[in-house]
Image (cartoon, rainbow, N blue to C red):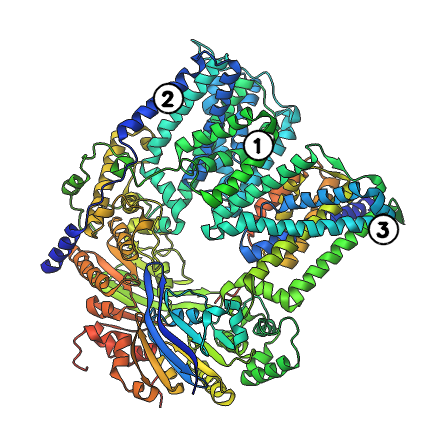
Amino acid sequence: MADLTSKLTQRISQTQDQSPRRKFPRAIGLILLVLAVALLGAFPLLPFVNNYLIDVGFIVGIYALLGLSLNIVLGEVGLFDLGHMAFCAIGAYTTGVLFHQLQLPIVILLPISAIVAGGFAYLVTSPVIHLRGDYLCIVTIGIGEIVRLVLQNNPGGLTNGPNGIGNIGNPDFGLFSIQSPTQFYYYIWIVIGLVIIGLINLQKSRVGRAWNYIREDEIAAKANGIDVRAFKLLAFVLGAAIAGIAGNIYASKYMFIEPNNFSFMESALLFCIVLLGGLGSIPGSLLGAAVIVIFPEIFRQFATYRLLFFGAALIAMMVFRPGGLWPRRREGLGFAGLGIRKLPRDENALLAEAPVPPRPGTVPLRTYRLPPVTVAMSEGLTLETKAITLRFGGLVAVSSFDMSVATGKITSLIGPNGAGKTTLFNVITGIYRPNKGKVIFQGRDITKLKPHTIIGAGIARTFQNIRLFPSLTCIENVMSGPHCHAREGTWPAVFRTPAQAREERKIVDLASYRLNQVGLWAFRNELAKNLPYGKQRLLELARALATSPSLLILDEPSSGLNDKESEDLMAMLQVFLGEGFTMLLIEHDMNVVMGISDWVTVMDMGSKIAEGPPQEIYNNPLVIEAYLGKEED
Amino acid sequence: MDTLIQQLINGLTIGSFYALVALGYSMVYGVMKLINFAHGDLFTLGSYIGYTVLVVGASWVTATFGIWGGMAVALVAAMIGIGVAGLVMERIAYRPVYKAGRLPLVVSALGMSFVISQGIMAIWGPNPQAYLSGWTPKDFLQFGNIRVPVLQIAILVLALALMALIYWLVERTTFGAAIRAAAQDRDTATLMGINFNLIIIFVFALGPALGGMAGVMQGLKYTRISFNMGWLYGLKAFTATILGGIGNIPGAMIGGLLLGVLEALFEGYVSGAWKDVFIFLILILVLIWRPTGLFGEKSAEKV
Amino acid sequence: MAAVLQVETLCVSYGAVEALKGISLELDEGDIVAVLGSNGAGKTTLLKSISRLLVPRSGSIRLRGTDINKFAPYQLIQQGIAHVPEGRKVFATLTVEENLRMGIFGVRTMAPGKEYKKTREWIFRLFPRLLERRKQLAGTLSGGEQQMLAIGRGLISKPSLMLLDEPSLGLAPVIMQEIFRVIRQIHQEEKVSILLVEQNARKALAVVRYGYILETGKIAIQGEACDLRNDERVKAAYLGGAKINNPAC
């Protein structure tokens, strides 16, 4: 055992450390940023800048704010929202209607517009949020159109139909009010600045990472304890609220709104802004907004054809540069890009500082609503399935299957192709719900729990065909593990509370420890998709370990590995066993199965045909028959 | 009673346009799993091609072939023109991004939609155009109290005939079976000797061609055409596609006719201003409750 | 006898994963040969490479002496190859009859003529159940019936070479018996050359003349079927006996 561990650490220390690549030093980036902000701030004061140009600057601001708000939904989470202007319309009309009906001041209407738009987004998207990408896209178009048509039809005489609402007031802060183009210019850009600070904080927190996990691979996100539905809704609500703010500011600047301000074409333009800039890129959204607004202003004679150019640009972009003009770079920044406070400058120091994770089973379970411990389990068992049956149409995939997994042991599930092994795994981890039977985990009935709750309860899994988050770095991949035990939500992330910062630090510590343990520390800042196949398997393993599970379920961990890698994997699994993890694997490589299992369960055509220690299984005639076929006479 | 019948006939007419456009959505989706956002704009392009043929050649075409012949020429021109446009579109906007995944395809389709509709505006101008009354027959048929224009009947008959033809082609011929086979399982279809590229070419020519003809029919019936009408027609036809079950050919036809009738009845008996809201609500509700469409998938069993 | 199929040092990878690491095998005209091995050994990959659904990294595949790359994937059926894919892959929303018609699509397009009808009658005699269900959608058939249909769909083009991928997969023993009876029959009566890929080694070795055992992308053992049947090494290749100290071995 000790020999194995030392062999492993030896191998790890041999791998070359790869320092983050940087295009230019951080200082230059900072100087450029200061210059850009200074230019933006000084713009209205420049000698050649007249009111017209200041208004252009304001419009760029409105589109930038809307682009940023759509970027949350489309860029961070990857949800195709082609009706985003509806949320802006709700904000603008909330302002317009309440201003006239209740004589509320514009400034007070700003947060109200945001809340109403966010609430509206919650109401209309929660029934459709589960829909697949392109369907959701169509639904958002439908929602956008419905909102515009309803405003046009003047319900209850509130919206004044196609004529729109006029005479909306300017914002008045008591001490000063905002009226002139220059004042509005600063007003919008200050709001944008605040929003950007909040968004960057969110991007660099577990909330932002959860959004990205969903965008990269929804199923893998679920299987790593991320409540996909909740985070998708959060993105819509937040995006809509910011769009509502933009609607309020727009209405107060022009003092007039009409339904056609919020047409499909406007939504499509926002879409272009985010895609041109790059999905999930904040500077990209600003750049996209500038291009979309300024380009038609310069080429006045072509202004009517702007959508023609943008359409062609979209196609060309998808063909030649799908990442956008200013994509968010993750791999070049190193750990600094994670936005966690007080990290040691030398990333290797983190390894020394990171505490050893607690033993499996001693991690406090997060506040997911877990069922109480009610079922008495036989001594020494971690997991039991009781008479699990699952049918797909007429086909019985799993038939009355009983299995038990002993605590602190390696149990293997084997069987010929199509026996139903992965299906059973999917039942245990909550992806499928069985027609009959129960899954009992540490005395809790987890049969009906959602996948992300099951992870939180202490079961982690890997996939047969490796499901990583391909465009995120290795450390970010592993950081999805601790997510399910973290508590700090959206607002602590936006304001970076000390508690949130401490929690983020814990997450990165745990992730570093696990990444190092599988020997991938040197690759921490590489994108997962750039790793060779064997290392991707290890990364997935580290990610599962980082959820601090009691039970680790591995679906064919050695498939696609060469003999050397297979052997290393076996050694590594032994190490984890020593740490106290219970393991359940599906494996085809019988050398692995026979070599490390304590117990083997054999499945054929959905039923259990044998179980026992490996030697016994090897000589069991039923098993031999399942694999090799019946003896012919 | 008379209004009911009148509304039903109107509904079937507009529904047959939806159905023809829906067929294109469904065919392309079936084979490529792609929602072709540009399809509605091809419909518009079709009606502009028909318009141009009749404007440019009005005296000559109508003089040579008569009113009916003139309309036929316009329809055929749109059919061929849009069929070719569909092929070109597939080549430049879709084929290079097939491998990149679903979402880049959707974006590319959206880009194509802008390019076509804005291209039409660039060529024919932003103002709506009108099919002239001299291009179409003015006769009526009298059934009791109901007067139905001969033109409308002709359009309805032609649209239904086209649908019957497509139904026969896709559901009854060996080639149609090959299309369905390729839609289901590309690799196995290749093992059978089905050339997948040929199938792609076929659906990207035929689907748009039908939409293009529907575009001409809409011009003949309602006279007014505009560069951005394809968006609304496309969205409604897509609703019809979803209603009938996407990828399901007969479903698209029934979905289109049903949607047209529902729209006409709603307009006639409830409210004209709210009819589009009604249709988009149908779209959303169907997607929530029956994403496989009213008729579901043809085969539920998957082994 | 002339070789109908020659595979030489074939290597195939999925991305970074090597699925086949230099496979060589031969199939003579009128012969029947099995490729055996457990899951993930590379059996299906081999057949897919022969049918050009996969592009090999290196090595060559020759069909009657001609490099297989000369034909587009969809043209191979015209060269007399019928590939019955793993997992049956019948077209679920097509009827049984339409599925059969798809089987000759690449050979004689559009018009199923007299000969087609004759072949179809023969297939219905081989699998009378298909006759009963000819108007049914293939998706509603049972697993065994789907396998019969898949084989029938391969046979209808009257191939000279059949590639059968795990015809026994997930079938009840009685049905399996029937499938193997038919495989033997088409080999003996119709003189079709057959390359049979199987996991069920014992069943397959009872039918074929010669066998190759594949283990993680390499040929581990090969030999006459009657020799392999009693070879302990075959069992070891499936159950990984090499790594445990089994007193029985």
Could you tell me residue C106's position as x and y percent? 57, 71
Quick one: SS at disc 1?
helix
Q: Amino acid at mark 1?
A: Arg
Chain to which mark 3 belongs = B
Residue B281 occupies quadrant: top right
Disc 1 versus disc 3: distance between alpha carbons? 41 Å
Mark 1: give few (<14), some (14-19) or many (20+) Cα within 10 Å: many
Where is mark 1, residue-wise? Answer: A306
Residue A27 occupies quadrant: top left
Could you tell me residue A89's position as x and y percent? 55, 29
Where is mark 3, residue-wise? Answer: B65
In which quadrant is the C terminus of chain A drawn? bottom left
Tell me: B173 left or right of A183.
right
Q: Which of these two is toward me, A188 or A32?
A: A32
Figure label count: 3
Vertical side of C129 occupied by A3: above or below: above
Q: Amino acid at mark 3?
A: Phe
Chain to which mark 2 belongs = A
Residue name at image x 15 percent, y 56 percent = A8
Quick one: SS at disc 3?
helix
Disc nearer the start of the sequence (2/1): 2
